[in-house]
Image (cartoon, helix red, strand yellow):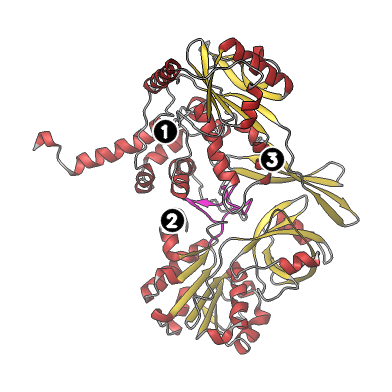
């Protein structure tokens, strides 16, 4: 990693040059919410002026730019009772600008899933290796809990990371490509004062988190609470719409579908993002559903995020951005569900052992 | 290993087994790919009918057979219904093999108990062939096979061969006998009354509908067979076979990667497994 500082106008000029020359996506205000707050999304940008540098959070994550909602895996063409299959692993280069540390951490987690193990995904690899990521730090929203998940900082998964230190940005350069791009622009080595400003900035971000979710020992806790009535309680609220999974930066469950073209001479095989909250997610051929109730499916989502992945890879897959909580039509959010689970356990303890005051 | 696109296969033969089940014989078209293709008993393939989709199917043929692959398939869903329209000579694709297998080498010099219910015989046929190919390495081999009705017992034409050539002690049972049925009647667990099991030297493989696993494995547990010597093959919805799509995830386990073959100890420690 190489560290540099750059003035804000110079950084904008750098970003402007980069996004003008490449297919780029950055945060843009797309609407205003009912609470008059701006709504941001990662959208195509063609100049620095398109980008909302001071955005808070995007409604949907940047996941779709690396793992599209729908992706063609292969094409079949039929002729004389025979067929040919065509497979391509190509992806054009893109620039992603303005990703927050939790979003970068989410991509790192997707990398673990899609690029490691016995079967790395060549489709994902093609997109990932052609993606240039510029991260930016930010002050958290009141309901962000990235700090609880230890995802509020990142040291890998980006080409360049910019931290706001007043009138300048402190740049962490993590790839030779980024270093070469920056050569054309005026940067300086950080002084001791710049280092101090960066540390102060990090302290400020850390202290700004208002929401804390206790996740210590959660995998075992979830195992113990597998049959807890709270799953039914939250399941009754859940609408099974799958919105949480669509906006989540780490939900990657998918469906594979094949469709004939209208000429019946070809068909395409597509991967489509899915959600474990959808009713048929665990339904097998013949109609049996291994998770027939809302609560079963909601529980499974929490198991995957806070237990399943943790057991497999020694880490939890949730990054604490709380996009799912903000998007949920039934106002279900991880903080409430996890706290509810813990509270129930604590209540159990008070039932079986007298509190110290009563002795 | 073929993962994202499959081996092109030609359907060479279709054997009707019952009203809803057929045995499809597939031959990998490319001779080099055919030579490379190898699997272990218990593994499965993703069978693709181009344009319709893919379905996970256990391999029912002998591992020693390098000429063709046999898949015992029930007409149950979108893909299998499309496959049932195909005639010999048609082309399909297979990806794989995927998943874990039965530890056939570990079972050597022991008694083997094979227990199948209904279509559960499909994944059991590969270990049966394995035992046939290496018969001297195994002691008593018993095969308990049950179905709801006698007409649902599959591969009946091979029963004599298994008994006489492979020296397998075959016991069959049906739940609802018709007028013709002269064999045992009732649940498959009632067959345990007829056989003497040496729990210290027995390995068990159980395949069947999910409801069967619990009753059979509990029975075997009571007989004293250690849970890590009982194996089950789980069914789940699988879309990728590569531990990516998560459709087959049970707890923290992927049925396609960590299964479909599990020892019973792993299964009872897995929430929602059976």
How dense is the environment of label 2, judged by Cα within 10 Å: few (below 14), some, or many (20 and up)? some
Is A335 or A192 nearer to us in this picture? A192
Residue B169 visible somewhere in the drawing = yes
Q: Between marks 3 and 1, how big is the CA–CA gap? A: 29 Å
How dense is the environment of label 1, judged by Cα within 10 Å: few (below 14), some, or many (20 and up)? some
Q: Name the residue under label 2.
A: B270
Q: Do labels 2 and 3 share a chain?
A: no
Q: In this view, does A61 lie above or below B54?
A: above
Q: Is the magenta stretch mostly helix, strand or loop?
A: loop
Q: In which quarter of the image is residue B207?
A: bottom right
The quadrant of the picture occupied by the C terminus of chain A is: top left
The local secondary structure at tag 2 comes to loop
Is residue B267 found left or right of A7 in the rendered image? left
Q: Between marks 2 and 3, how big is the CA–CA gap? A: 35 Å
Is residue A224 found left or right of A74 in the rendered image? left
Q: Name the residue under label 1.
A: A150
Q: Where is residue A289 in the image (x, y as percent from the top left)?
A: 54, 51
Is residue B63 found left or right of A172 in the rendered image? right
The local secondary structure at tag 1 comes to loop
Q: Mark 2 lies on which chain?
A: B
Q: Where is residue B63 in the image (x, y as percent from the top left)?
A: 65, 73
Is B109 or A15 nearer to us in this picture? A15
Q: Give the range drawn in magenta.
A: B234-255
How dense is the environment of label 3, judged by Cα within 10 Å: few (below 14), some, or many (20 and up)? some
Magenta-colored stretch includes residue B247? yes
Q: Quadrant of residue A93?
A: top right
Q: Mark 3 points at which residue?
A: A126
């Amino acid at each position: 990693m190489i560290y540099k500082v750059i003035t804000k106008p110079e950084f904008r000029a750098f970003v402007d040059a980069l996004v003008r020359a490449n297919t780029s996506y950055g945060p843009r205000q797309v609407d205003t919410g009912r609470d008059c707050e701006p709504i941001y999304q990662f959208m195509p940008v063609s100049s620095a002026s398109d980008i909302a540098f001071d955005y808070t959070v995007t409604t949907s994550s940047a996941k779709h730019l690396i793992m599209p909602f729908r992706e063609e895996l292969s094409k079949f063409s039929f002729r004389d009772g025979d067929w040919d299959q065509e497979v391509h692993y190509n992806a054009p280069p893109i620039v992603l600008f303005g990703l927050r540390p939790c979003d970068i951490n989410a991509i790192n987690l997707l990398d673990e899933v899609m690029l490691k193990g016995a079967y790395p995904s060549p489709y994902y690899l093609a997109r990932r290796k052609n993606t240039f990521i510029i991260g930016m730090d930010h002050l958290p929203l009141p309901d962000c809990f990235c700090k609880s998940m230890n995802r509020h900082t990142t040291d890998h998964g980006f080409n360049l990371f910019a931290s706001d230190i007043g009138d300048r940005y402190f740049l962490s350069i993590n790839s030779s490509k980024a270093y070469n791009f920056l050569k054309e622009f005026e940067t300086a080595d950080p002084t001791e004062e710049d280092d101090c400003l960066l540390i102060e900035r990090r302290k400020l971000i850390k202290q700004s988190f208002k929401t804390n979710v206790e996740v210590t020992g959660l995998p075992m806790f979830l195992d113990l609470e597998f049959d807890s009535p709270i799953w039914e309680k939250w399941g009754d609220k859940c609408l099974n719409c799958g919105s949480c999974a669509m906006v989540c930066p780490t939900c990657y469950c998918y469906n594979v579908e094949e469709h004939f073209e209208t000429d019946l001479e070809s068909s395409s095989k597509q991967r489509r993002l899915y959600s474990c909250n959808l009713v048929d997610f665990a339904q097998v051929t013949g109609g049996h559903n291994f998770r027939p109730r809302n609560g079963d499916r909601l529980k499974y989502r929490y198991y995957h995020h806070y237990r399943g992945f943790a057991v497999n890879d020694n880490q939890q897959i949730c990054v604490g951005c709380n996009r799912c909580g903000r998007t949920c039509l039934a106002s279900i959010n991880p903080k409430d569900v996890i706290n509810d689970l813990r509270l129930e356990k604590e209540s159990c303890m008070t039932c079986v052992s007298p509190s110290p005051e009563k002795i | 290993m073929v993962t994202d696109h499959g081996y092109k296969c030609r359907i060479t033969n279709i054997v009707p087994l019952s009203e809803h089940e057929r045995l499809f014989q597939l031959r990998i078209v490319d001779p080099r790919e055919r030579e490379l293709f190898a699997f272990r008993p218990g593994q499965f393939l993703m069978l693709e009918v181009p344009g319709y989709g893919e379905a996970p199917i256990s391999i029912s043929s002998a591992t020693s057979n390098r000429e063709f692959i046999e898949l015992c398939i029930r007409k149950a869903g979108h893909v299998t219904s499309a496959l049932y329209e195909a005639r010999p000579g048609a082309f399909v694709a297979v990806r794989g093999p995927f998943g874990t297998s039965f530890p056939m080498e570990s079972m050597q010099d022991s008694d083997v108990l094979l227990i199948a219910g209904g279509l559960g015989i499909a994944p059991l046929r590969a270990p049966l062939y394995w035992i046939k190919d290496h018969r001297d390495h195994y002691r008593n081999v018993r095969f308990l096979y049950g179905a709801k009705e006698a007409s649902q017992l599959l591969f009946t034409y091979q029963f004599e061969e298994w008994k006489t050539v492979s020296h397998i002690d075959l016991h069959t049972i049906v739940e609802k006998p018709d007028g013709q049925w002269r064999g045992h009647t009732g649940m498959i667990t009632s067959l345990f009354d007829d056989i003497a099991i040496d729990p210290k030297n027995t390995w068990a493989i159980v395949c069947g509908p999910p409801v069967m696993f619990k009753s059979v494995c509990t029975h075997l547990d009571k007989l004293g067979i250690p849970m890590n010597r009982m194996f089950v093959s789980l069914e789940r919805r699988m879309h990728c076979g590569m531990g990516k799509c998560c459709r087959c995830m049970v707890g923290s386990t992927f049925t396609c990667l960590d299964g479909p073959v599990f020892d019973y100890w792993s299964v009872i420690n897995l929430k929602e497994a059976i």
